[in-house]
Amino acid sequence: MNIVFVEPSFPRNQRRFVQALRSVGANVIGVGETPEDWLEPDVRDALVGYYKVDNVTDEHQLDAAVRWAQERMWVDALEATVESHQMAAAQVREWRGIPGTSVRTTWLCRDKPSMKEALREAGVPTAASTAAETADQVRDFAREIGYPLILKPRSGAGAQGTVKVRNDSELADALSGFGDATSIAVEEFVEGHEGFYDTISINGQTVHDWATHYYPNVLEAMRHRWISPQFITTNRIDHSPFYAEIRGLGQRVNEVLGITTSATHMEWFYGPKGLRFSEIGCRPPGVGCWDLYSAANEVDVYREWAHALVHGSAERKLTRGYSAGLIALRPDRDGHITGHSGVEEISGRYGEWIIDAHLPGPGTPTQGVEAGYMANAYVRMRHPDYDTLRTMLDDTGRTIQVHAG
């Protein structure tokens, strides 16, 4: 199978996808913004061809690259795993007659109000939402639904640009922060615990899946330096009516949005109003989730994704042997890292359960709290018991300190 893959070298984990495709027998043609002679050897060795463009999100440049590939070989698939690359790839698939995720599906997975409207109409519970082009439309929605509300870019990924407002004054301040945006997504704030459901699907049917929990919820985690936020994937997904409900809704999402053979990322909330699905991504999750899933299930999830694309089947079963999680460790102030404390204590207590750790050395510039879970320091662990793992991660957050000056 010949597969054109969008941007094989940046961000850095993109190389995992092309290497996985190559490992299951695919011929991979890369399209990226890096000059070919700047590609690192492990990326270049995984490719049978490469076409440089100035901007991979420009559908016309991407179309020219795919046309170049089609002049040299039959192209079976065009794959993009980064959120911002999705729409251009979908458009070029349709122009070039290549099967895969459609423009309609990509649009529904990118445009939050349209996504939620389609899901609600099909009986998948979501928060009330709307697309607003004017401040008056936002205020009308606030009067109808009430506070608190969530405002976000219509096509943003994750929590990027997301603002929670509790009253008219906060709403006015938030609206000024969207600047020249012609339209934003506005939705009801759903109270409850937050997590996400990730899958690999083949012809619309889930073949691998994972349920993961945030502690605390993302908006809270991204606003307070003192919090060492975590996310943990559970190995109890096969043994709970709650996860059965999530799985059922996830399958319904595939049907409603037209997701066929793809990785997916589905965010959810569970609270007083029950289970509510939030954002849907027709792509792999970020922040190294697949590394956790691989460690938790003793399988290479990147290779499983590649095998699904190339051979139309899963290669190995998930063991569910472990739960696995990440804890983000924030510097005590902005500036430059000066050192760490508590690392030896945690290593001594939990060394056999530590997957890996990222502890930037002295002099490394810090990144802001809002930059995310892997922006500064973090530790990843696994354990056969979910509750024990949570205790270990909590202890790690209290014990390891990241010092800056």
Image (cartoon, rainbow, N blue to C red):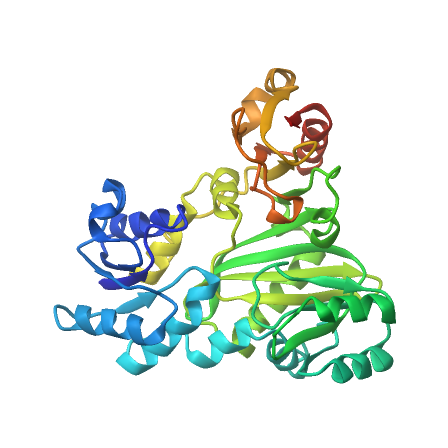
Picture coordinates of residue 77, whole percent (x, y): 29, 68
Picture coordinates of residue 400, whole percent (x, y): 66, 25
Residue at the far left in the pictured view = 72
Picture coordinates of residue 141, whole percent (x, y): 79, 81
Q: Quadrant location of residue 98?
A: bottom left
Position of the N terminus by quadrant: bottom left
Q: Nearer the viewer, residue 65 or 196?
A: 65
Question: Left of 104 or right of it: where is 31?
Answer: left
Identify whether 22 is placed above or below 352: below
| Residue pictured at 32% horizontal, 49% vertical | 20
Confirm whether residue 125 shows in the render: no
Identify whether 312 is placed above or below 228: below
Question: Left of 83 or right of it: where is 182?
Answer: right
| Residue pictured at 54% horizontal, 24% vertical | 362
Confirm whether residue 265 shows in the render: yes
Position of the C terminus by quadrant: top right
Q: Nearer the viewer, residue 328 or 260?
A: 328
Identify whether 42 is placed above or below 31: above
Number of numbered labels in the structure image: 0
Q: Nearer the viewer, residue 193 or 384?
A: 193
